Image: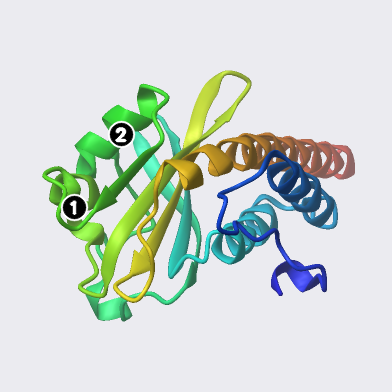
Amino acid sequence: MSAGSSDPVPDRGLQGWTASGRLQATTQLRSRLEQVTTRRDVARVGSEYFRDMFNARSVSITTLGDGRYKELVNVGTLPPPSGWYPKETVYPETVYPLTTQKLKAGGYFTANLDDLDYAELVGSRDDPKVQSVMGAPIVSGGQLRGEVFMARGYEQEPFDQEDLDASRDLAGFLGDSLQAAAGRAEVQAEKARRGIRSSGQ
């Protein structure tokens, strides 16, 4: 199980994601995120939880700001490094124009291999073993902060509206946790700067 927890994640079941299952997921994710403090660890725990809950082949979490994406973490079954693109962990939002447009409009999206906009949404993230993707905007304080991007392979059921709806609460809570972690890092950095200035006097 992810995040070092023995508690199983909720199961979607034949009737779809129930209200109780979604509430359990939010409570469970909150509990796991409370055990970590840095932004990268928050992203890691969050991505592992998304992977387990949505049975994703892979999950990537990126931040978005100042016109740039910045990768925080990738988990799951990924293409070999030789096939990664962009090679850098920081890249302009223009690399994925349609994805960026949807995210800025507050949109959650799914795309399957036979959809007309699949290639444009996936772009250079395309993996020949993937047939369905889902993107959830990370929003905190009313602002778009990044994206949770998930993929499923040919042997799996494609993502659907039920999955999108279930991801909404989790992505929002993840955004708040990432912002809180960034705030803690700023406080620590400021304390360190003050310490350096004090020692130099």
| Visible residue check, residue 38 | yes
Residue in the picture at 15% in, 43% down: 117
For the view shown, which residue lies furthest in the left direction?
A: 116
Most extreme residue toward the top, as rendered? 142
Q: Residue at x 63, y 56 (%)?
A: 40
Relative to 96, say whether 158 is above or below: below
Q: Which residue is mark 1?
A: 123
The image quadrant that residue 106 belongs to is top left
Dot placed on the residue nearer the N-terminal end, 2 or 1 = 2
Determine which residue is flagged by label 2: 100
Q: How many marks?
A: 2
- Which quadrant of the rendered structure holds the C terminus? top right
Q: Secondary structure at mark 1?
A: helix
Q: Left or right: 195 with respect to 55? A: right
Residue 110 lies left or right of residue 113; in this view the side is right
Look at label 1 and name its amino acid: Gly
Q: Looking at the image, do the residues carrying marks 2 and 1 touch, with CB atoms under 8 Å apart?
A: no
Quadrant for the N terminus, please: bottom right
Q: In this view of the protein, can residue 63 be seen by the observer?
A: no
Disc 1 residue crowd, few under 14, some 14–19, many 20+, Cα 10 Å: some
**Residue 111 vs residue 146, the one in the foreground:** 111
Q: Is residue 86 above or below residue 7?
A: above
